[in-house]
Amino acid sequence: MSQYTVVRDYRYPIEEVWHVLTDPEYVARWTTTGRGGRPEGYAAVAGTKFRFVGKPTMGWAGVVHCEVTDVDAPRTLRYTWRGDEDSNAITVVTYLLEPIAGGTRFTWTHTGFTGPAGFVMSKLLGNVRRKMLTEGVPPILAAYHSARRP
């Protein structure tokens, strides 16, 4: 079984990082960095079914079907991930936020990939996530933080 994990430290309080990573208005801004998809119907509420819609490619319709399974704000969010609505191949994405000196550590883990195709998919998605979390999230966090300051 394959998985990938991306860890990033942000210099903002956990509540601000949580907000940018889970508020639908902000999620749409950073998930489209690189080759990521925009969320449709997303809410950080257990039981919420939503989709990420991206650019279709050969062998993929461009839609990922997800369902939020666990929320413990502002520390944990977990949702399922299926590349095809009728697929039995379900993987799981987990967000873990931890306060650290000077900010917040964010760990994104995506587990459950199987077989050679799963290995390739985990590598591809891992690269996209690294770009989102390195290039997409920081400027959005900075803007959100600045807007909150008196």
Image: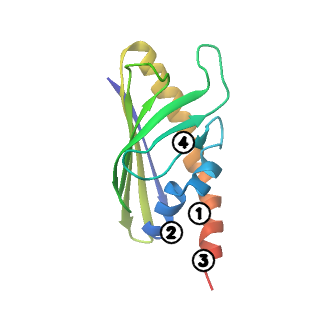
Q: SS at mark 3? A: helix
Q: Is residue 103 visible?
A: yes
Real-space Cα separation, disc 2 to disc 4, in angstroms:
19 Å
Q: Quadrant for the N terminus, please.
A: top left
Q: Amino acid at mark 2?
A: Tyr
Q: Amino acid at mark 3?
A: Arg
Q: Residues within 10 Å of mark 4 (few under 14, many from 20)?
A: some
Q: Amino acid at mark 4?
A: Arg
Q: SS at mark 2? A: loop
Q: Which residue is rendered at x = 50% and y = 34% of the image?
A: 126
The residue labelled by disc 2 is 12
Q: Which residue is rendered at x = 49% and y = 51% of the image?
A: 43
Q: Earlier in the sequence, mark 1 or mark 2?
A: 2
- Position of residue 103 relative to residue 79, above or below, is below
Q: Earlier in the sequence, mark 2 or mark 4?
A: 2
The residue labelled by disc 3 is 148
- Check contact, mark 3 vs mark 4: CB within 8 A: no
Real-space Cα separation, disc 1 to disc 2, in angstroms:
8 Å
Q: Earlier in the sequence, mark 4 or mark 1?
A: 4
Q: Amino acid at mark 1?
A: Leu
Percent across and percent down for residue 113 are 38, 24
Q: Earlier in the sequence, mark 3 or mark 1?
A: 1
The residue labelled by disc 4 is 130
| Colour setup of the view | rainbow
Q: Is residue 135 visible?
A: no
Real-space Cα separation, disc 3 to disc 4, in angstroms:
27 Å
Q: Earlier in the sequence, mark 3 or mark 4?
A: 4
Q: Nearer the viewer, mark 4 or mark 1?
A: 1
